Structure formats: structure tokens, C-alpha cells
Image (tube, rainbow, N blue to C red):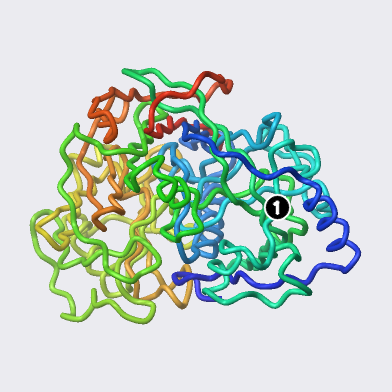
Amino acid sequence: MEAFRGTTTSRASFIPPLLLLLLFVALSALAPGRAAATGVFEVRRKFLRHEGRGPGGDEHLAALREHDGRRHGRRLLGSVDLPLGGNGLPTETGLYFTEIGIGTPARTYYVQVDTGSDILWVNCISCETCPRKSGLGIELTLYDPSGSGSGSAVTCGQDFCVATNNGVTPTCPSTASPCQYSITYGDGSSTTGFFVTDFLHYNQVSGDAKAVVANTSITFGCGAKIGGGLGSSDQALDGIFGFGQSNSSVLSQLASAGKVSKIFSHCLDTVNGGGIFAIGNVVQPKVKTTPLVPGMPHYNVNLESIDVGGKTLQLPTNIFDIGESKGTIIDSGTTLAYLPEVVYKAILSEVFAQYVDISLKNVQDFLCFKYSGSVDDGFPIVTFHLEGDLALNVHPHDYLFQNGNDLYCMGFQSGGLQTKDGKDMVLLGDVAFSNKLVLYDLENQVIGWTDYNCSSSIKIKDDKTGSVYTVNAHDISYGWRFQWHKSLSSLLLMTACSYLMF
């Protein structure tokens, strides 16, 4: 499967007939979903921070590589609504997960936040291959369709099922049969199941630094079978919450219902941990933007040039062209930054230009070296220039991460090391967006950012009332609870936290 293109397929899945019958009976017995509101999610980091302690350096670097390998394999077509949080440093191995409530009564689920995929899915009670325990220290919950008083089955004849099958009614025994999905990721992991509709519970902004509970009826996947790495108990979660651009995403569903506008932002704090994630129109700070490339399934932008220490790199004129497995993607779910080989070598040459005698060594395909001074004082800023005169400054403390005492490794990587399909692509992950407020305005098809103190707060405007609310940063790394309140506002806030591991 291609790693940097939509790698999932939504089609009739191969489920044993008896399992299909049992799930259909259970789903058909559910009551219809009811109208609902919007809300807030809080996010944890999946991995602990590594700063020369804990597991060995080589093991940590291997984990970074493995994370981004899975990450690229899970980049899908489309869009979904979920706030994203955590710490963007490479030393964090930036996988993030959030706690959500589903059903009536609401039960708690921990799902991975994935900006590169579309649908929300959670493992179902009928799944025999789904993990029952997690090495993350969280309690896993299997969704029971028959145990919720607000759920309903999605059938093959319904519009949602047709839409997720590229506008074509899927092949089913009848239009009343359950609408199935099957997703295979680039790393070989997979999930297969059925779409259901039920209440999603979350917190919602009601005033300055205040939130109230909300719930909305949304359609999501009920996983009946899981395969590959998703079935491992080591880092098991209840499912994946995608955040792409498709109409099947939760964000799109909420926007279609008039609950929110399709604008979200995140600010990941690598200094103190935690951060901010919000859905809504950010009015402070002001953010300069660049256009998203039309018709692309991911967050593609037009990269024009790269400077290192103020010196423009001399690169092939077509190196940043958009095409088959080419172009520039922004993905806050990827930890590192991956570049075409010629770009990677040019950056390395300028970064180490004044250190001709420095000893570089290869550690798990990472370029590492010994250095005892301040990297910000000793190395140059790398600047990516995008369409619309928008600059992305990546500081040395972002692209050089510590992996032991005075040992630093490069966060920039050759794309060919990660995937053959991505060797000619620029993929900018968290090393490029640490301590920046990143704004995704899908209403106007632009994306932008500004350097920001992610431990502070932002201001969001409620488009329905005109009110402007303060949204504070949060760090819930050491345990937190969902707090259920009464629903008021139409804005979604997602507070980010870092759950440090390694």
C-alpha cells in the first residue's frame, strides 16, 4: 500500500456469516439516534518523554521510526473531527490519544487521535481479536451496540453508507443489511466492522476558561475484527479517531448539522507539556495562512524554497512540484520530518558547514553526534517558505533532539528510509510545529501557524453569538476525569495534554 496517499479501503469486509448475522441482529434492535450538541475532548500522549533516561537510546530511536512507519501507513483519504494534543518533540514519539464518551449511558473510550485518517471507530464487544488489556495503564472498553439506549444500525441503503463507498450502493444481501467497512493500513494492520450511529459525549466551551457537557449523534465504526499491530496489547487503545477532510468525519458531520464551523487549531507545548486544541474561529493570536492544494486528501501545501541560516538552498526547480507521490504534506501526527534525498543532503551540508571535524555516526538510521554547547547558539534555523509569503521557522532545539548525555540526533530524515512511495515527498511532522499555534481553516481551505506560548491561552469567537471566549492551555498528564455538565455553546474545545513515557 502507498504510504503517503489514501491507503485505506472502505468496502464489504470478509466477516464470517455467523458473526455477520449476530451483529446485524444486535444492531437492528437498537433505538434510533437522537439529535445532540457539540463538545470538548481532552488528549493524552501515548509515549513518555525520553531525555537520556529510561530505555536505551537505540531502542528509543527504533520506537520513533516504528511510530512514524505506522503513522504513514495510517494516512487515509478524507476528514474527521477530533481535537489533537500532546507534545510535538521527536523525543516524545508523538502519538496522542483522547478520552471520549459514547452511548447512553455514556461509557469511556480511549482513542488515538489521527490527523491523517477519516472515520472514528472503536472495537466492538463481538471482536475476538481485540486486546482486553493495555500496556499504557488505561482500561479498555469494548463497545456493545445492544447495551446503548441511543444507538442504531447504519444499513447499506442509507446515504452515509453510499457516500463512504464513493457514491455507489455497496454490494450487500439487501439494502437493510449492515453497512460494513474494512480498512487496511500501510503497515498491514486492519480493522473490519459495521457503521453505527450513537451519541458522542464531550465538553464544550461555555465562557472564559469554562466548559459544559454536550452530546451529538454521530456515525462511526464498530470494529468486529482487528489485525496486525492494532491487536497488540503493549500500546493498545479502544480505536482511532480520524481528523482528515472527508464528509464522513465527525467534524464534517457536526458542521453539516450546523453545530460548528470547519475550523480547528492546536498548540502543542514541548516546554511544560500539554497545550491547546480548539474547534472554532481563532481571533487571537492572528495567524498568517497559506492555501491548501485543492483536491488533495491530506493537508498539502505549496512549498517554494528552503533557507538554512538565511542562505537559500540551490535545489532542482521541480523538487517541490505536486504530483504522484510528490508535494508537501503537513501532518502533526508524524513525529519527524521526511525530505527527498537531495533536499535532506543539502540541509545537512549547511547545518554542519562550520563543523567540518564533527564526528557523525549512524544510530538506527538517525544521524547523531556529540555536542556539549547550546544547539540554538551553535546551529542555524531552517526556514521553509510557502505560497503566500508564509515562513515556517524550525529552530535547532526542534530539529536536533537529545538522545543521551550530550548526544544529539537529527529530526530531519530522508524520505527514502521511511517508504519508497514517500522518497520524493516533503512530510513535515511535529519537529516543525513544536510550540506553534497551527490553524486549519477548512471553510476557506487554508492552513497557517505562528510561534506561540502553548502554555498560555487563545481567544475563540462564537460565530452564532459573536461572543469571544478565552481557551486556556491544560496539562492533564497526571490523571484527569471527564466532567459532565449542561450544554450551552456551539464551539468545540479540545485541551491537549502530554502523557510522557520513554
The residue at the far right in this view is 18
Name the residue: 51% across, 29% down: 214
Residue 268 in the image: x percent, y percent? 36, 37
Above or below, 4 relative to 41: below
- Residue sitting nearer the eye, 427 or 311: 427
Judging from the image, what secondary structure is the residue with disc 1 in? strand
Above or below, 274 relative to 73: above
Q: Residues within 10 Å of mark 1 (few under 14, many from 20)?
A: many
Instruction: Specify the quadrant that holds the C terminus.
Output: top right
Specify whether 208 is left or right of 334.
Answer: left
Above or below, 124 relative to 299: above
Specify whether 51 is left or right of 267.
Answer: right
Residue 319 in the image: x percent, y percent? 23, 77
Specify whether 124 is left or right of 336.
Answer: right
- Residue sitting nearer the eye, 261 or 282: 261
Res 479 visible: no
Name the residue: 15% across, 38% down: 286
Q: How many marks?
A: 1
Res 286 visible: yes
Name the residue: 38% across, 55% down: 331
User: Which residue is disc 1 drawn over?
Assistant: 222
Three-letter amino acid code of the residue under disc 1: Cys
Residue 226 in the image: x percent, y percent? 74, 58
- Residue sitting nearer the eye, 241 or 138: 241
Name the residue: 76% across, 72% down: 174
Above or below, 433 relative to 297: above
Instruction: Specify the quadrant that holds the N terminus.
Output: bottom right
Residue 235 in the image: x percent, y percent? 66, 44
